[in-house]
Image (spheres, grey):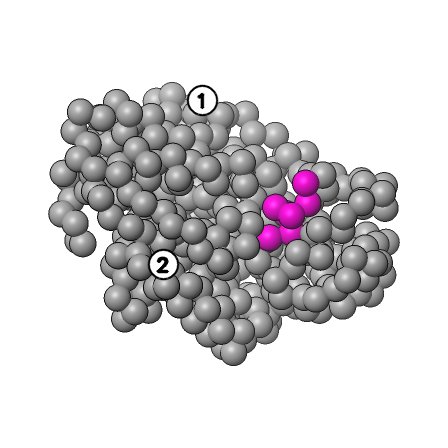
């Protein structure tokens, strides 16, 4: 079984304890944050193991790359501390089980991974994706299992991730374009953290997107709109890619005003918090997040993750914001989709 590559000394000598000190859901002073994290490191009982809401943020806050979130999830599973009721935990395990019903297109050296999100199959089409759209891979066999960190089921990840990677290898691919943040984060953060080899090159869809939009620059008509960006929890695993959102928006003439809950201080869509921590916290997070979007005067709420979009679309619309995925926003800029559609 794969084990987490974790260096106790890195935490013991940490000068900041930012992983817990910056947490938006647990409050510690600097000494308490360091003490509680060291309890987790040593396998002792800690309030963190009971109160963590699984937002992924400590993975970003730890600038020493020591994977505090994965360790917290490991310790929870070791101690049998469930993050959600057992039926919900088992439901997620069962509904993401591989069943041999995957869909695979005309794949050669490159594949376009749509994970287990049907919305991404249709989204990865049109002029932007014309060369890669036929090479689609979709289904539980190609689903990144990172979602199970939310339920402290790291054993499921260690069991399934090597199989997912091998399924891509069997396709003979050299590159996999990940249309879901969680997939890219799985291959570039979770896999190396556990010493799981990835024998193909994962490509983040925003890197692909910005290059294609540069190729299509003659077709771009600046949208001249103001938007609020909904950053998904999985983007916390790849903070080095955050700047690409602004880069793409600048390219298509979209303004991204400053607001409280963005960047390192972002709030997730909160739907997974509903399963883990209950309705009160989820409703509070969503209400604060949307109110913060509205006060910017934004016309659109731009999504990165289809799951976030499904969760928040109706709610942002009721507050006067038009929901749109970043890919569809780019399609608007080249005239492939109408504004507001």
Q: Is residue 101 rendered to the left or right of residue 219?
A: right
Task: Answer with mark 1 or mark 2, whichever residue precedes in sequence.
Answer: 1
Residue at the (60%, 53%) spot, across then down: 57
Foreground of the two, 285 or 262: 262
Residue under pointer 2: 296
Q: Residue 36 occupies which quadrant of the picture?
A: bottom right
Q: Which residues are magenta?
A: 56-63
Q: Position of residue 137 (x, y in %)?
A: 36, 37
Task: Answer yes or no: is residue 309 visible.
Answer: no
Q: Which mark is residue 174?
A: 1
Q: Residue 127 occupies which quadrant of the picture?
A: top left
Magenta span includes 57: yes
Asked if residue 255 is positioned above or below residue 201 in the image, the reply reads below
Residue at the (29%, 50%) spot, across then down: 226
Q: Nearer the viewer, mark 1 or mark 2?
A: 2
Asked if residue 250 is positioned above or below residue 171 in the image, the reply reads below
Residue at the (50%, 25%) spot, across then down: 200
Q: Position of residue 267 (x, y in %)?
A: 50, 59
Residue at the (80%, 45%) spot, across then down: 15
């Amino acid at each position: 079984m794969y084990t987490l590559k974790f260096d106790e000394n890195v935490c013991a000598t940490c000068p900041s304890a930012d992983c817990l000190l910056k947490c938006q859901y647990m409050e510690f002073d600097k000494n308490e944050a360091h003490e509680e994290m060291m309890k987790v490191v040593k396998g002792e009982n800690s309030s963190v193991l009971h109160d963590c809401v699984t937002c992924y943020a400590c993975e970003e806050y730890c600038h020493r790359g020591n994977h505090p979130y994965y360790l917290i999830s490991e310790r929870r599973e070791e101690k049998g501390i469930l993050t959600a009721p057992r039926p919900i935990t088992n439901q997620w395990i069962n509904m993401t089980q591989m069943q041999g019903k995957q869909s695979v297109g005309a794949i050669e050296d490159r594949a376009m991974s749509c994970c287990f999100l049907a919305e991404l199959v249709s989204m990865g089409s049109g002029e932007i994706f014309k060369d890669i759209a036929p090479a689609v891979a979709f289904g539980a066999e190609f689903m990144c299992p990172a979602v199970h960190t939310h339920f402290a089921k790291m054993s499921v990840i260690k069991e399934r991730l090597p199989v997912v990677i091998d399924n891509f290898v069997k396709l003979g691919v050299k590159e996999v374009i990940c249309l879901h943040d969680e997939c890219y984060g799985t291959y570039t953060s979770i896999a190396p953290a556990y010493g799981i080899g990835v024998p193909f090159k994962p490509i983040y869809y925003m890197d692909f997107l910005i290059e294609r939009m540069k190729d299509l620059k003659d077709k771009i008509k600046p949208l001249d709109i103001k938007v609020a960006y909904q950053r998904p929890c999985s983007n916390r695993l790849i903070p080095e890619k955050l700047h690409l959102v602004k880069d793409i928006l600048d390219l298509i003439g979209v303004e991204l005003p400053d607001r409280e809950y963005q960047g390192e201080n972002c709030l997730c869509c909160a739907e997974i918090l509903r399963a883990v921590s209950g309705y009160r916290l989820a409703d509070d997070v969503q209400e604060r997040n949307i109110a913060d979007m509205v006060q910017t005067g934004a016309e659109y709420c731009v999504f990165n993750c289809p799951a976030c979009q499904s969760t928040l679309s109706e709610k942002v619309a009721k507050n006067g914001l038009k929901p749109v995925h970043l890919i569809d926003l780019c399609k608007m800029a080249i005239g492939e989709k109408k504004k507001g559609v």
